[in-house]
Amino acid sequence: MIVSKYRAKHFRNIKDLELFPDAGVNVIFGDNGQGKTNILESIWMFTGCHSFRTHKTVELIEKTQREAKVSLSFSAHGMENDAVLKIDQKREFMMNGAVKESPRRFLGEFQSVIFSPDSLSIVQDAPAERRRFLDIAVSMIRPAYSTHLLKYTKILANRNALLKQISLGGAEENYLDVWDEELAREGAHLTVYRLHYTESLARIASEIYKEISGGRESLYIEYQQSSRSVSAEEYELAESIFMGLQKNREADIRRQITSVGPHKDDLYISVDRLAARQFASQGQQRSGALALKLAEGYIIKETCGEYPVILLDDVMSELDGRRQSFLLEYLKNWQVFLTCCDASQVSRFKGCKTFHIEQGACIGE
């Protein structure tokens, strides 16, 4: 997958910017606050996912304007494509002249992986960050997953609202039965997708981490279910979630929140069998996050037959020389968009194309 042309108008601080990227490494450099990350953010949004920086649409539009527009020309599976994203009160995608019904319909059309300093949160932060990582990664290769996720989220919201009503005496407890069945069914769909993805992720990320560490350390990844099911069969997963909901019903009513289901699951990450979140050094955590994101890209390539576009937002300053060299060597056959502040760093990216960004405009290549 190769981006051949990029244009943005009124996206954040970008007034009107047009770039013709190289098929290899593209270095976007300039001082902080000039619009480098805005370029990566707008490219990422063609995945059909939300911005990796905000959920507020209004923040994506230049303050003096009512609408932002981004267009992307890219090749995939031997075909040339033109995609357009319009942002006003909502997001509207067009692919080769045809309007997509919703952003979710764009999933699978353009595939990209974003790696930034915030990616460390996958290893360092609470389970919600790891679930978010899984939700985005699975949706990228299995667009149907996002439909199940949306259904599950709505069912969960309805069940939680009913728990509150029951707790306050406004509804009968047996009303929960139908929601428990639906939540278990949709939850089982999500869990099957996640288990299959984690199986590939664990295998590939551990191999990458081994290369990064020179074989001195090992990375271990396991999907942990709140329902404690030992089966990967969908009907047994559904039964396990349902039984967990029944068992915890009293506590759920008291706390007014659902305690069992994929929304409570976690991705366990360890280095040398010690939990990475608590016991890994910062260097080990960086290596773990890097291995996870590179594995995400490789799984896209393995599943869809195309290298995804790689977006590296100011990560080189976060990595030591050895990890920088490994990253650049690993991505030598991929199209990469890389941002950095220090122009002196540009010289180490041999054969790359450079774009100097100032106040949302390109002032030189």
Image: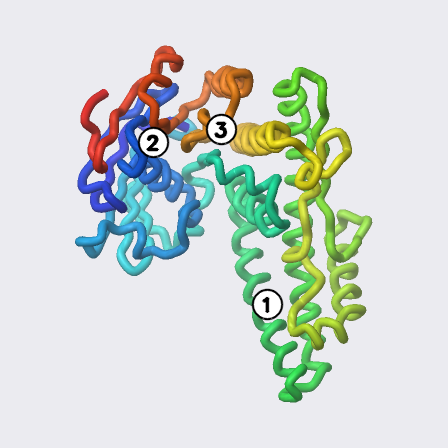
User: Which SS class for mark 3?
Assistant: helix
Q: Point out the residue furthest to the bottom here.
A: 169
- Percent of width and height locating residue 219: 70, 29
Q: Which residue appears at 65% of the width and 54% of the height? A: 189
Amino acid bearing label 1: Ile
Q: Nearer the viewer, mark 2 or mark 1?
A: 1
Q: How is the image coloured?
A: rainbow
Q: Left of 119 or right of it: where is 5?
A: left
Q: Which mark is residue 155?
A: 1
Q: Earlier in the sequence, mark 3 or mark 1?
A: 1
Identify which residue, 169 or 105, lies in the foreground.
169
Amino acid at circle 3 = Glu
Q: CA distance from mark 2 to mark 3?
A: 30 Å
Sequence order check, earlier mark of 2 and 1: 2
The residues tagged by marks 3 and 1 sit, at their Cα atoms, a distance apart of: 40 Å
The kind of residue tagged 2 is Phe
**Distance from label 2 to label 1 (Cα)?**
37 Å
Classify mark 3: residues with Cα within 10 Å, few (<14), some (14-19) or many (20+): few
Provide the residue designation for mark 3: 318
Say which residue label 2 marks. 74
